């Protein structure tokens, strides 16, 4: 059974064949964020309010550093995937490709800088 409309058949456009993959990728990262964000808020809240040395000592614990790193990576990747989808939908041609490149580069740079900072504190 063919589910394309007459207009799509006339224009030769149909499914982009990428929606299901994007949907599942976003669902998985959303489910991960449901568990990671409250854990990060609790871990961050416990370390809040101490002196500079106390906070550095607290974030040097492996569990705290791992929770912070995982929440950073999952959150930024979720943000990047949703931003790329919005750019893909609304910005076309060369500006769209440049915006997608810039978004991807900025996201991975943000992850690298964040993980470096966490590693520097934790080690």
Image (spheres, rainbow, N blue to C red):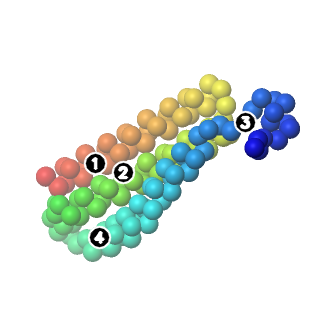
Disc 1 element: helix
Residue at image mark 3: 14
* Residue name at image x 62 percent, y 25 percent: 94
Within-10-Å neighbours for mark 2: few <14, some 14–19, many 20+: some
Cα separation, mark 2 vs mark 1, equals 8 Å
Where is 51 relative to 6, above or below? Answer: below
* Residue name at image x 31 percent, y 42 percent: 112
Residue at image mark 2: 73
Residue at image mark 4: 43
Cα separation, mark 1 vs mark 3, equals 41 Å
Rendering coords of residue 117 (x, y %):
25, 49
Quarter holding the N terminus is top right
Where is 28 relative to 81, above or below? Answer: below
Can you tell which quarter of the image residue 17 is in? top right
Residue nearest the observer in this picture, 120 or 29? 29
Q: Earlier along the polypeptide chain: callout 4 or callout 3?
A: 3
Q: Do the residues labelled 2 and 1 touch (CB within 8 Å)?
A: yes
Within-10-Å neighbours for mark 1: few <14, some 14–19, many 20+: some
Rendering coords of residue 69 (x, y %):
29, 55
Residue at image mark 1: 115
Rendering coords of residue 67 (x, y %):
28, 61
Q: Do the residues labelled 2 and 4 touch (CB within 8 Å)?
A: no
Left or right: 7 as drawn, with respect to 87: right
Cα separation, mark 2 vs mark 4, equals 16 Å
Cα separation, mark 4 vs mark 1, equals 17 Å
Q: Do the residues labelled 1 and 3 touch (CB within 8 Å)?
A: no
Cα separation, mark 4 vs mark 3, equals 47 Å
Q: Earlier along the polypeptide chain: callout 4 or callout 1?
A: 4
Rendering coords of residue 43 (x, y %):
29, 70
Q: Which of marks 4 and 3 is in front?
A: 3
């Amino acid at each position: 059974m063919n589910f394309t409309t007459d207009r799509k058949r006339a224009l030769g456009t149909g499914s982009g064949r990428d929606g299901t993959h994007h949907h599942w990728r976003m669902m998985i990262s959303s489910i991960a964020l449901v568990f990671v964000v409250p854990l990060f808020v609790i871990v961050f809240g416990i370390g809040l309010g101490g002196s500079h040395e106390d906070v550095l000592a607290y974030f040097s614990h492996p569990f705290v550093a791992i929770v912070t790193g995982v929440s950073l990576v999952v959150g930024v990747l979720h943000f990047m995937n949703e931003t790329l989808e919005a750019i893909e939908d609304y910005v076309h041609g060369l500006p769209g490709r440049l915006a997608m490149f810039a978004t991807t580069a900025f996201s991975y740079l943000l992850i690298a800088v964040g993980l470096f900072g966490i590693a520097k504190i934790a080690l």
